[in-house]
């Protein structure tokens, strides 16, 4: 699989395309459709890019508040829905809270990674439910005061996604990209403050500035973003590059898919070794070996995973 865009570094200015698209779309249906890594471009796009997300158009409407008679799901139940049964099933909570010294939350890029991961689940949760989940998790790890600090940044970060940029991001007008970057930088620092804006967006802004400095003919060969990190590039740096090129939501889902695939490969290798051991057990007859292998598989795999493993192992 190859994820390609005509201009990989242009996404650095979007700074949260996934969350901007959320604010712009209507309220989710009662039974949300499963999310996928690649989705059709939203209405009003050009060359696959959302002009709204990249800075053009009017401010998107804020999502409607939950109706008073609609009960909101509790944070612990929402965690079960998302991380056990839902779109982030099998994934760990990404990023971190940053450095909490007991009185102040120090700016950290890790907090934006955590926010962006949780915001990919919009459609499975109401905005108020997600905010309550953030508060619940932060209070568990940092205490009440730390949770309040986290929520203050969460609210400012989501308000930034609602900002109506005046300078549109036109992929055919690289001569205007400097103005686009400047407007985004000012809006980010106004919404988040200089320290938090720098922590959240420094890498993306530097990458986009380098792309601008290359000039209109300075094109960088596009990496194979689904491949392993190149030699000499750490997994963390590789993920940051993918987020700048593909957008935070796509990069997060790609990393989740890689973790799920690695876990599946490990489980399947363990099953293969076990089946080979049982198939060679001298104390068992051929029928007993088959039954023992199938019993082990039934114990360690469920549902479609069991059918898939059985087919791959020839059982």
Image: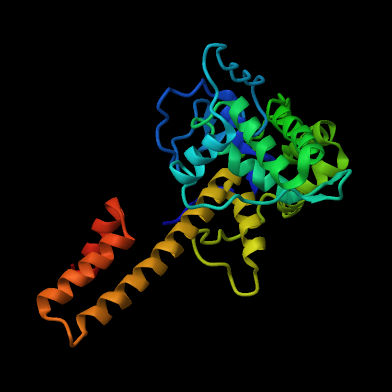
Up/down of 166 relative to 284, above or below = above
Residue 17 vs residue 48: left or right? right
Q: Quadrant of the N terminus?
A: bottom left
Q: x, y percentage for residue 288? A: 14, 75
Q: Depth check: 87 or 205 in front?
A: 87
The residue shown at (57%, 17%) is 66
Up/down of 200 relative to 238, above or below = above
Q: Quadrant of the C terminus?
A: bottom left
Count of numbered circles in the view = 0
Q: Depth check: 151 or 57 in front?
A: 151
Quadrant hosting residue 11:
top right
Residue 85 vs residue 72: left or right? left
**Residue 204 visible at all:** no
Residue 267 vs residue 56: left or right? left
Q: Depth check: 301 or 98 in front?
A: 301
Up/down of 85 relative to 27, above or below = below
Residue 286 vs residue 199: left or right? left
Q: x, y percentage for residue 134? A: 66, 37
The residue shown at (46%, 48%) is 89
Quadrant hosting residue 24:
top right
Quadrant hosting residue 33:
top left
Q: x, y percentage for residue 39? A: 45, 38
Furthest-top residue in this view: 68
The residue shown at (79%, 48%) is 199
Q: x, y percentage for residue 25? A: 53, 24
């Amino acid at each position: 699989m190859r994820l390609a865009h005509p201009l990989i570094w242009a996404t650095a200015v979007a700074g949260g395309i996934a969350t901007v698209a959320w604010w712009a779309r209507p309220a989710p249906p009662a039974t949300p459709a499963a999310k996928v890594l690649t989705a059709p471009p939203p209405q009003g796009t050009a060359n696959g890019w959302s002009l709204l997300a990249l800075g053009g158009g009017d401010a998107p409407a804020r999502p409607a508040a939950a109706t008073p008679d609609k009960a909101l799901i509790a944070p612990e139940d929402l965690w079960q829905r998302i991380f056990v049964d839902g779109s982030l099933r099998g994934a760990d909570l990404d990023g971190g809270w940053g450095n909490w010294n007991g009185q102040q939350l120090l700016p950290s890029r890790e907090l934006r990674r955590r926010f962006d991961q949780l915001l990919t689940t919009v459609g499975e949760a109401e905005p108020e439910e997600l905010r309550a989940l953030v508060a619940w998790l932060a209070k568990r790890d940092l205490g009440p005061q730390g949770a309040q600090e986290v929520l203050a940044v969460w609210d400012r970060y989501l308000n930034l996604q609602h900002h109506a940029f005046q300078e549109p991001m036109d992929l055919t007008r690289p001569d205007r990209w400097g103005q686009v970057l400047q407007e985004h930088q000012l809006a980010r620092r106004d919404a988040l403050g200089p320290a938090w804006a720098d922590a959240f967006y420094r890498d993306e802004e530097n990458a986009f500035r380098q792309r601008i400095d290359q000039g209109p003919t300075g094109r960088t060969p596009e990496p194979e973003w689904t491949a392993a990190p190149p030699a000499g590039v750490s997994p963390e740096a590789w993920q940051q590059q993918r987020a700048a090129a593909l957008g935070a939501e796509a990069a997060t889902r790609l990393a989740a898919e890689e973790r799920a695939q690695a876990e599946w490969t490990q489980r399947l290798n363990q099953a293969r070794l076990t089946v080979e051991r049982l198939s060679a057990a001298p104390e068992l007859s051929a029928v007993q070996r088959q039954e023992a292998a199938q019993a082990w598989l039934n114990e360690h795999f469920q549902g479609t995973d069991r059918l898939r493993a059985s087919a791959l192992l020839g059982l």
